[in-house]
Amino acid sequence: MVDTNGYSALLVGATGLVGFELLQQLLGDDNCKTLTVLVRRPLRTLSVPAAARAKMTVLTADFDRLEEALADVEADIVFCTLGTTIKKAKTQEAFRQVDLAYPVALGEWAKSREAGKYIIVSAMGASVKSSIFYNRVKGEMEALLGELGLRELHIVRPSLLLGKREEFRLGEKLAILLSPVLKAVMQGPLRSYRPVRAEDVASFMRRTAEAPVTDGPDPVIKIYENHAITVN
């Protein structure tokens, strides 16, 4: 359960676009008392004071041995920002491992530790019935997590993400360049499809963590579409 005096958090996926933004925000947030970060490769340089990093513990491990890596970790809130692309993963199987298998394994860990909330980044259009492989895998991931009976499952579905990545993605680069134009023309029903800044997604996840855990016997599942995330 989440303590009213603050919470302990686990973040998995901190080397990605949203994850890195979330990491820096959590380090600067007094509501987050302790932060464990599970990564497979070294973190980038953090732009936060050294004192803020004192509450952070970084674990580097093979995600195929996630249960072993997290054996001594406890967390009120679990954040998952894992995600890749077919181009980077090379094969559909490798993509499914990162975008489905690892998040579900993390959900099982969160369930076993009775974490108050599991907050995960999915994608706009996620659906088990989608004809698009990417969206179908995201939908399958959501469905499997929903079957775990987590205390609270919060699924965040952003549109195209804006931000500075380590790797080049043409679609996102074009979206950044065209962002002012897209905001002007994507009004009304199209507003839901606007690109969203990674820092806004991270901020939304952080605020979701701060809300009191629902008091009741039944598991809670909440899905947030892109229009709920964007702030302007």
Image (tube, helix red, strand yellow):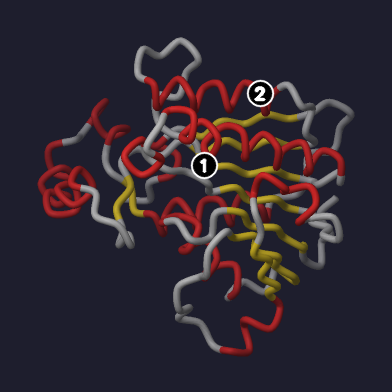
Q: Which mark is residue 144?
A: 2
Is 202 situated left or right of 89 in this image? right
Q: Which residue matches tag 1?
A: 121
- Residue type for callout 1: Val
* Quarter residue 33 falls in: bottom right
Above or below — where is 224 with respect to 27?
A: above
Q: CA distance from mark 1 to mark 2?
A: 14 Å
Tally of numbered discs: 2
Residue 3 image position (x, y, % from top left):
84, 59
- Residue type for callout 2: Leu
Q: Which mark is residue 148?
A: none
Mark 1 crowdedness (10 Å alpha carbons): few <14, some 14-19, many ≥20: many
Is 60 situated left or right of 8 in this image? left
Above or below — where is 93 with respect to 74?
A: above
Is 232 situated left or right of 144 in this image? left
* Quarter residue 188 falls in: top left
Residue 129 image position (x, y, % from top left):
46, 10
Residue 197 image position (x, y, % from top left):
34, 53
93 or 11: nearer the viewer? 93
Is 164 situated left or right of 29 in this image? left
Mark 2 crowdedness (10 Å alpha carbons): few <14, some 14-19, many ≥20: some
At 73% across and 44% down in the image, what residue appears? Answer: 117
At 48% across and 78% down in the image, what residue appears? Answer: 46
At 59% across and 60% down in the image, what residue appears? Answer: 39
Element marked by disc 1? strand
At 51% across and 70% down in the image, what residue appears? Answer: 43
Element marked by disc 2? helix
Q: Closer to the N terminus: mark 1 or mark 2?
A: 1
